Amino acid sequence: MRLRATHLAGAVIASAGLGIGAVAISSGAGAHENEAQATLYSTTGLKIGKVDFSTDDGHTKVRVHLDSAPGVDAFHGFHIHANNNSSNGDGCIASGNFVSADGHWKLAGETHGHHQGDMPSVYVNGDGSADSRFTLDRFDPADLPGKVVILHAGADNFGNVPVGIAPDQYTANGQAALDATAATGNAGARVACGVISER
């Protein structure tokens, strides 16, 4: 996945490289072939924003718009979760902090930072608003309906924690910390959830 990020008015906007401007919209054959969307709700049931997915010239464009996310600011982990284990419930059940969403959407053998559902972190302004846009080639919007998108309480380390005994490495304080990094980038609790549907 190739990304380029531009900070604009406190938001992070990212798009694929190859000379495409950060907010440029390409056109031509194959534009907007597939589209999907999700409405994000907090654990209290408050509608806080939406996520739009569209295909544009063979890549997937993602826009995350938050109107106001109470108590949420700075960088937050942002992922697509599988929503595939009915024993945990289905969709975005707020009780239990959206455990119904199950784990990250991933293929066999994928580690965090390379999961199918891993996406760039979202920057949330101090007033709880955000407008993040990025382009990636990891999935097609047609593959998303029925899955859910999750905004986490903390930043995502993308599995990039140099654990070891060298002076420039970290010593893990327990297996739980290693497991959380391997599973979610240790991004913490799930603070918002949205079921993805066709648009």
Image (tube, helix red, strand yellow):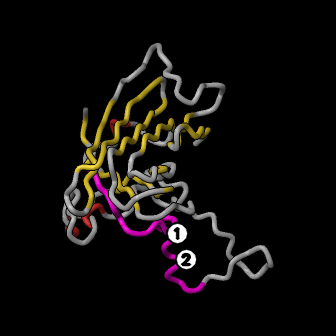
Q: Amino acid at mark 1?
A: Ala
Above or below for 134 versus 179: above
Question: For the residue labelled by badge 2, is the local secondary structure a helix, a strand or a loop?
Answer: helix
Q: Which mark is residue 182?
A: 1
Residue at left 35%, top 64%?
190
* Residue denoted by label 2: 178
Residue at left 54%, top 54%?
114
Specify start and end residues of the magenta stretch as a single range. 173-194
Above or below for 179 versus 65: below
The residue most toward the front is: 127
Residue at left 42%, top 45%?
130
The residue most toward the top is: 28
Question: For the residue labelled by badge 1, is the local secondary structure a helix, a strand or a loop?
Answer: helix
Q: Is residue 59 magenta?
A: no
Label 1 Cα crowd, 10 Å radius (few <14 / some 14-19 / many 20+): some
Instruction: Residue 122: give x, y in percent of width and height.
Output: 47, 50
Above or below for 155 versus 51: below
User: Do residues under tags 1 and 2 come within 8 Å of each other at their CB atoms?
Assistant: yes
Instruction: Residue 73: give x, y in percent of width and height.
Output: 44, 57
Residue 23 or 180: which is nearer the viewer? Answer: 23
Spatial CA distance of label 1 from label 2 is 6 Å
| Quadrant (top left, top right, bottom left, bottom right) of the C terminus | top left
| Quadrant (top left, top right, bottom left, bottom right) of the N terminus | top right
The residue most toward the bottom is: 174
Image-based side of 39 in relation to 1, left or right: left
Q: Is residue 178 magenta?
A: yes
Q: Amino acid at mark 2?
A: Leu
Residue 68 or 37: which is nearer the viewer? Answer: 68
Instruction: Residue 18: give x, y in percent of width and height.
Output: 65, 28
